[in-house]
Image (cartoon, rainbow, N blue to C red):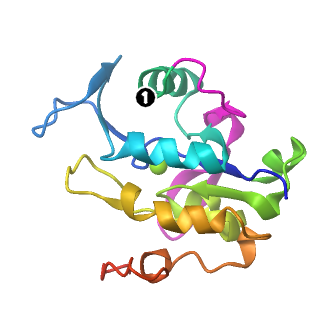
Amino acid sequence: MNRPLLILDLDETLISAVEETPAGGFDFQIPGFFVRKRPHIDRFLQGVREWFDLAIWTSGTEAYAEEVVARVFPPGAGFQFVWGRSRCVIRYDEELRRHFFLKDLKKVKRLGFDLRRVLIIDDSPEAVGRNYGNHLFLRPFRGEQDNHEFLEVLPFLEWLKDQEDFRTIEKRTWRTRLPGHCLNNDSS
Ligand SMILES: [Mg+2]
C-alpha cells in the first residue's frame, strides 16, 4: 500500500490564534496574532509523521500559513504541500447566512494522491463538505490547556494508517473505538 497522506488544518486544529493578548498566555507571536499551540502537538506530530506524509491546508492567507508553519514545525519539516486560502473555494451557507471556505480534495487528487488513503483533520466540517469520507473531526481548539485530543486520537490514527480505504470507515466514533480508549466523551 502507498503511504497515506494526512492534511492538517491550522486554526482551531493545530493552533489557536487571537488578536488580543489571551488571558491564559500564549506560545508565540506572529504579526497581528498571539498563538497558542494545541496541547501535545509535538507528540502528535512525531506520531503521525511516522505513519503519514503530511500536508497543511488552511483557509488563512498563504502568508499566514508560512508564518505559523515556520514557528510550529522544525525547518525542513518536509510537507507535500502548504496551502492557504487561494486553494479554497468560497461558498455561501444559506442557513447560516455566511460565506465559508471549502477545501475540495479534487485538488489533492489532481496532484496524484489516491483519495482512498487521504485523511484531513479539520475542526470545520463545512470546510470539507464534499469529502466527508476523508474527514476526521477534532473539537475546535480555543486555547484551553486541558484539551488532550491529540494524545487520545493517536491510537486510532495508528490503526487507520493500515486501512485500504479511509472513506469506508466510520471516523466520527474514534473516541470510543479502540479497546482501552473509551474515554466517555460527549462526542455530539
Ligand atoms: Mg480550522
Residue found at x 55% / y 28%: 61
| Rendered-image quadrant of the N terminus | bottom right
Q: Which quadrant holds residue 62?
A: top right
Residue 26: x and y in percent read: 21, 31
> Looking at numbered disc 1 in the image, what kind of residue is underneath it?
Val
Instruction: Note whether 54 is above or below 29 in the view shown.
Output: below
Residue 84: x and y in percent read: 61, 33
Q: Which quadrant holds residue 152?
A: bottom left
**Residues in magenta?**
75-102
Q: Is residue 174 left or right of residue 120?
A: left
Whether residue 160 appears in magenta in the rendering, the answer is: no
Residue designated by label 1: 72
24 or 90: nearer the viewer: 24
Residue found at x 43% / y 43%: 11
Q: Secondary structure at mark 1?
A: helix
11 or 97: nearer the viewer: 11
